[in-house]
Amino acid sequence: MITSTSSGIWVVGVVLLVAAGFIALLTQSLWAGLAGLALVGVYNVWAWRRVELWPIDRDSAKTASQVGWFASLLAWLAVLFH
């Protein structure tokens, strides 16, 4: 069966969101957080319009999903234990 994956677009979005939250807390500025949130939105729109999607096999989709979750976990751990 053929499935597809979103590559690393959402992973970059999560990393940007975590970084924006960290910067907002560090600077104690709501505007920094809102600017980071806007950056995540702009990146997401830009990345999805730019990417070329093609069908991949189920095993590749599963591996890509696991890698994405692992990268997100590392980003969260980096922020929590900084």
Image (cartoon, rainbow, N blue to C red):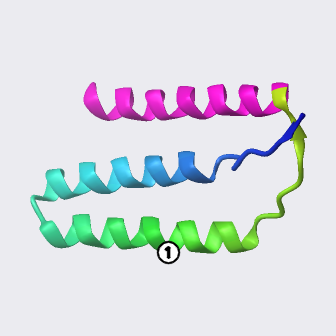
Answer with left or right where residue 10 lies relative to residue 15. Answer: right
Work out which residue is located at the far front of the displayed protein and give it: 1
Q: Which residues are magenta?
A: 59-82
Q: Position of residue 16 (x, y in %)?
A: 43, 54
Up-down relation of residue 57 to residue 43 (above or below): above
Residue 55 visible? The answer is: yes
Q: Amino acid at mark 1?
A: Val
Q: What residue is drawn where x is 83% and y is 58%?
A: 53
Up-down relation of residue 12 to residue 61 (above or below): below
Q: Position of residue 6 (x, y in %)?
A: 69, 50
Answer with left or right where residue 46 lies relative to residue 78. Answer: right
Q: What residue is drawn where x is 54% and y is 30%?
A: 69
Work out which residue is located at the far left of the displayed protein and give it: 28
Which quadrant holds the N terminus? top right
Q: Please say whether residue 14 is one of the residues in the magenta stretch.
A: no
Up-down relation of residue 52 to residue 46 (above or below): above
The residue indicated by pointer 1 is: 42
Magenta residues, dominant SS class: helix
Quarter location, residue 65:
top right
Q: What residue is drawn where x is 44% and y is 64%?
A: 40
Q: Please say whether residue 68 is one of the residues in the magenta stretch.
A: yes
Q: What residue is drawn where x is 77% and y is 34%?
A: 61
Quarter location, residue 75:
top left
Quarter location, residue 29:
bottom left
Q: Position of residue 70 (x, y in %)?
A: 55, 26
Answer with left or right where residue 54 lies relative to residue 65. Answer: right
Answer with left or right where residue 16 lies relative to residue 6. Answer: left
Residue 82 visible? The answer is: no
Which quadrant holds the C terminus? top left
> What secondary structure is marked by label 1?
helix
